[in-house]
Image: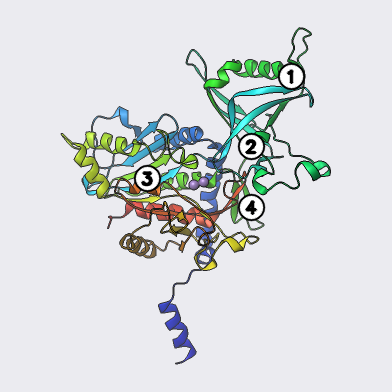
Amino acid sequence: MSSEDKSNLEKELTYNIDSAWKDCDEKTTEEIMKFSDDYKEYITEAKTERKAVIVAEKILREDGFVPLSEVDELDAGDKVYLNNRGKALAMAVIGKKDIREGCNMLASHIDSPRIDLKARPLYEDGDSLLAVLKTHYYGGIKKYHWVNTPLSILGKVIKEDGTHVDISIGEDESDPVVVISDLLPHLSKKAQSKRKTGDVIKGEELNIIVGGIPIDDEDIEQKLKINVLKILNDRYGIKEEDLISAEIEVVPSGPARDVGLDRSMIGAYGHDDRICAFTSMMACVDADQPERTSVVVMFDKEEIGSLGNTGAGSMFMNTFISELLDRLVDGYNYDDVQKTFNNSMAISGDVGAGVNPSFKSVHEMMNAPKLGQGLVITKFTGAGGKYSANDAHAEYVSFLRRMFNENDVSWQACELGKVDEGGGGTVAKDLSRLNIETIDAGPAVLGMHSPFEIASKVDLYETYRAYKVFLESQGY
Ligand code: MN
Ligand code: MN
C-alpha cells in the first residue's frame, strides 16, 4: 500500500475536524467580521432578558413581523411573534405545509447569570462611611468573578400606582458605574486566604458600593442613604418602597470587545445564551420562505432551572402553537397541538464549554468543544451517567449531520466535559417533554457565566448558518 493510498484510506474512514477558519476565504472572513459587528451591537444592548425582548421586537418589526394579537388569520409566509410578559418571546414564519406536519424549532434563553438586588437593598455603613446595596445573585456564578469590575444597574421599577420606570445607570459613557470591592491582598491572610473557591467571596459579601457623600441636612440621621435615595428620586421619581416591586439587575458595564491580536474572538457579558438567541433570530429573519413553519423561541429563567411562567418549563410553547393553530385551522383542538409537537424537530441552542488552554484536565480532549471549530453538536448533556439529560436519537443526529455536511457548515460533535467531571442541562429536556425531536447545538465559549465570556467569531457565524439551513430544511 502506497503512502498516498494509506492517507486516502485514513481520510475515508475517520472523522476529522479542523479549524473552521481554514475554510474561510477573504470574502467569507469579511462576512464573518460584519456579522460579528452586528452581534457586538446586539449583545452590548441586550444585557437583561427584558432588554433582549425589546431589541428582538425592534429587529422583528423592522423585518415585517407583527404581534400575534394583531392578526386573526394566518397564511404561508406570514411572520408573527408573541411577547410573554416582556421576558420571553416566540416568533414564527408560517410554512407552506400544514403546521400539523411539524415545525422546525430553535429555542434558546435570554437570561444570564447576574447580581440581583434584594427587596430591601439600601443601607448606609457607618464604619466605612459608604452607601451600599445588598444583593442576591442569580444563576450559577463564581462569586469572586464579580468583584473589582465596573457594574451597571439595569431594570424596571413598578410604582404603587402601576407606572413603569426603566432604570439604567452605567451603560452611557457619561454615567457613573458601581462596584463590589474585594479585600486587598495585604490584609487577606486571616480573613480570606484559607477560604475554599466557592467562599472566596460569600453571597452576603456581594455588596455594591453606590455612594459616599452625606446629604447636607443636619436634621437627617441616615445622611449617606438619604442622599442616594434623593439621587434616585430626582432621576426616576422613585422612593425606597418602590424597590420592592422592582427587578433590578446588576451586570457588567461597557460594550462587547474584539479579543485577540487577530480579532478572532468577541468578549462580552451574556454570550450564554444570547449568542444563540441572536443567531436563531437572524436565521429566522434571513431564511427563505420555509416549507415547514419556523418557530424561534427565547426563554427566560433557564439559569435558575427553567421554572416560572416565562421559562421553558411553562406552558408557553403550548400557548404559542395553540395561538398559531387557532389562526390556521378551522375548529382546531388540543390533539392538533400535540400532533404539531409530535411532528416537530428542535435545536436547543445553548453554549458549550470550550477548551481553556490552562484547564484542559476537565475535558476528554477527543470529545471536547474547541473555539473556532464551528457549531458544537451535543447529543446529550446531563451529569453522572447522562442523568437528567435529553439524549438525542441517532436517527435525528444522522439527519442533522447530512444536512450540515451538504451545506458546508463547520460542526463538531462533543460532550460537556470528562465523564463524572460535573455537568449541566439546557432547555432541551423541556422541549423533548413535549415529544419534540430535540438536540443541543450552539457555539463554544470560554469563561462561561463570568462577566466577560469569550466566543469565536467563526463559531458565531457557523451557528447562524447552521440554524438557517435547519429552518429552511424539509424535516426528516
Ligand atoms: Mn445556557
Ligand atoms: Mn448558563
Amino acid type for the residue under numbered disc 1 = Leu
From the image, tell me which residue sits under label 2. 203
State the separation of the CA atoms marked 2 and 4.
30 Å
State the separation of the CA atoms marked 2 and 1.
24 Å
x%, y% of residue 383? Answer: 47, 55
Nearer to me, 253 or 368: 368
108 to the left or right of 239: left
Tell which tag, 2 or 1, sits nearer the viewer.
Answer: 2
Task: Work out whether mark 3 precedes mark 4 in sequence or the reverse, and give the earlier one.
Answer: 4
State the separation of the CA atoms marked 3 and 4.
34 Å
97 to the left or right of 362: left
From the image, tell me which residue sits under label 3. 430
Of all residues shown, which one is farthest toward the left?
331
From the image, tell me which residue sits under label 4. 259
Task: Work out whether mark 4 precedes mark 1 in sequence or the reverse, and give the earlier one.
Answer: 1
Checking the image for residue 224, the label placed there is 1
Of all residues shown, which one is farthest toward the right?
186
